[in-house]
Every structure is written in C-alpha cells, then in structure tokens.
Amino acid sequence: MRCRLAFFLPFVATLLLSLWCTDRADAIPAFSRLHKTECTTCHTIYPELNEYGEAFLKNSFVYMGKPADRKKGEGASPAVGDKGSDSTKDLKNEGLWLAAIPEILPVSLTASMDIAYDNHPPNGDKLDLSSRSLVLQAGGAFRDKAGFFLNYNLYSQGRYDPLSGNVPGNNTPDIRELFLIWRHALNTPVNLKFGRLEPKLSLWKRSNKITVSSLATTAYKVGRSPFSADATEDALEVNAVLGSRLFMAGGVVDRNGQNTKEGYGHLSYKFGGADYLGNEPEVDLDKDSIWDYLSIVAGAYGYSGRNASLVGSLADKRNSYYRAGVDIDLVYKKLRMRLSGAKGRDSNPDFLAQPVDIDSIVLASEAEYMFDTNLIGVFRYEYQDDGTAITRRYIPAVAYAPLQNTKFTLEYKYEGVASYRAAGSINRIALLGAVFSF
C-alpha cells in the first residue's frame, strides 16, 4: 500500500533519464537552410519543438508561413513549400518545380559525444569516455503534396543496454526512420504516412526533448520484451488536423515474423497559443488575458500488440500487451511543464513456458525554465513500477546552446530501486553530452 501511494507525492517535480540515447534529431539544419529561417523558429533549444515546430511536423514538413509575409527568395520555395506559391515565374528552374525536386539537397548530419559516470556500471568501468555517434538525416516536402524523413545511423560507439543504451542496438549502420507522407490525400484533411516510423502515441516524439534522455512513460520496457512505446516500427498511419486545434492519428503496425497486425490510436487538443496550422491567436492590446501567455495541450493514446521469442526464425512463446497513456504539455511564458502517465499489461513478457501476467504503471513530470534563449534548466521526477521493481528517479539537468546548432547538456540522475525479488539499490549517474548538427 505504501508503495502504491508513494508515487503521487512527487508528481509535481519531473521525468526520466533512461540515460544514454542517440535519438537526437527530427531537428535538422536542412530545414533551416531550405526555408532560410533560424533554428529557433521551430525550437527552444534543439531538438525540442516549440508550437511552430509542432505545426511544421503535423503538416508533413510543409512550412506554414504565408508567402506574403516573406521577402522574395526567402522561406519555402514552391518546389518544396506552400499552397499559396505563385507559379513558376519567380523560379530559376521550371523543370525542378514541375518535378517537385528541392533546389537544395535536404541532408544534414548530427554528431554526439558523451562523458558518463555510473557508480554501478554493469562492466565495472565507472567512467565512460567512449560514447559517440554520427547520424545522417534527410527531410522535407515535395511541394505541398508529400513529406519525407530519413534518420540513418552512420556510426556509433559505446556501451549498449536495451533499457538505457547510449547507442543503437546493433551499433552498426542502420535505418531508424524512413517514411513518406501523402499530404491531404485525395483533397481531404487526411495525411497517409507509411514506412519505418515512430507511431504517434505520446505528445512528444523520442527526439523532442532538451535533455539527452527520453521520457519514461514511452521508453520503459517490461521483462525481456523489446517493446517500448517510442520504438520505431514498420507502420501505416492515418492522421489529420481537424478544426485547426484537434489532432487525430491511428495506424497499423506490421511486425516481422507474425501475421497478426498491431494497432494504435492518438487524440490531442490544444487550448491557447498558436494553432496546428501556425496561426497566432488574436490578442486584445487593451486588456491582458492569461491566454495571451498560456497554452495547454492534452492528449491520450492506446496501443495493442504482441511479440514472441524466436527459435531460429520462427515465433515461439508469445506475449500480448497493451499500453494506454495520457499527456499534458503546459507552457506559460518561460515555464514549461510536462505531465505524463502510462499503464500497461503484458501477458508473458519473459517468454516463459508458463505465462505470467505483469501490470505496469509509469508516472512522470518535468519542469523546464528558460533562463535565456540559449540556457534552459530542467528537473524531472519519475515513478516506474514495471512488475519487477519500483524505481524512483530524480534528475536535474541544464542545457546550453552557444550556437543554435550546438548544445551541451549536463545531467545527474539519482535512482532508487526497490526490487520485488532482491535487495534494493541506489544508482547515481552523471552525464555530460555534446551534440552538434550541420
């Protein structure tokens, strides 16, 4: 009873550090070069998105600024940009416009280097200086008809752990995301997205954060099951912005080695601030309102699927599972709060001959304050009950961006683990991370 009540107490503080992750970029300089705009147009400190970055993402990488608001030659060209673009008269190459080929190759690279200290490392090496990665990204839109994105791991080096690895699982070149979006299919509000992608569940993608770490509510795993809500999958997704402030998404996942498909759904609504089409709210200059400074996004999601252990290439013992979650993202002036909760059930996450059900619950909160445009402080709290242990994490962090495409992050994690089957432990992990994109 004590354990069940305890998770409510610190819920005003903050989130997760599943500490070492390289998934740092849907934010790519290719977008900045393409649209001739600053990184801060879409980001606080990259790769965390602000409300205009969210609108850009939800509109399939089509820049939602109005051509009349930009000087000639600025912003998205009709080759990759807006519905309101004038014809070909302002373009140097009519052939490129007709083919929807971007004039600028939309490719970027992101490099990261980490120094980590762990008081209880699995390999006995408390100080790790060997964590680094180089990731290739490409993304953009073919006029206003289709969007695309690629995230490809070129190189990584460092210790891998399936729950808190700082490098991709196979530590070799691999595609994390590769998808195409048919925007406003058949002249409807619906977007059709397919390929290797992160299913739309939480309000925040795995890369949408200030810190190096991911949110516990989507990153946690149960037993030996490799499933986490923020993992990329081969999927077909349908999504749409309805009425400018309601976003809906649903999809089907095709997991290798099984005929049964998995399904998921997401629903979110935004109160205050700019809407999902990039339109600013009306402001009464004669009278202040809290909604001049406050925006709130509330979302809910669900996922149902199954996986199995493999004998050779055949599925053996199966695990059916579901995840359900709710998120709230609140922004007031320089303060941002994220509240998140997820509940799940796995029928056989350890792939045993005699299945054992495990219920899980994870609650997290994060307080983030912008001291300056390039300096943000963060504090997270996380409560995680994955059926084998109850873990509480306290994580202060600070992120500094001397340049818009360069970021340094200092994080500290205090983690208390109360195991159901063994003695508890206290883990202390510190991380200094540097990441830059070009």
Image: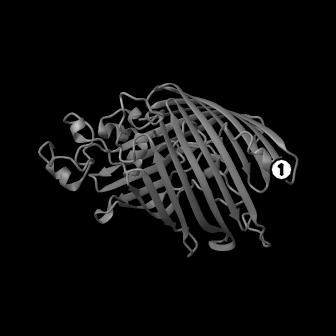
Q: Nearer the viewer, residue 238 or 340?
A: 340
Establish if 333 lies above or below 95: above
User: Percent x, y for residue 388?
Assistant: 79, 55
At horizontal 50% and vertical 46% (from top left) the residue drawn is 297
Residue nearest the observer in this picture, 200 or 309: 200
Q: Give the residue type at disc 1.
A: Ser
Residue 108 visible:
yes
Look at 26% across and 41% down and name the residue there: 66
Residue extending furthest toward the bottom: 259
The C terminus - image quarter: top left
Q: Which residue is mark 1?
A: 419
Which percent across, then down, holds residue 292?
A: 43, 34
The residue located at (83%, 42%) in the rendering is 425
Which residue is rendered at x = 78% and y = 67% of the image?
356
Residue at disc 1, secondary structure: strand
**Residue 223 visible to the viewer:** no
- Residue positioned most to the front: 287
Task: Measuring from the top left, give residue 322's x and y in whole percent.
Answer: 64, 64
Q: Is residue 316 above or below residue 108?
A: below
Q: Quadrant of residue 261?
A: bottom right
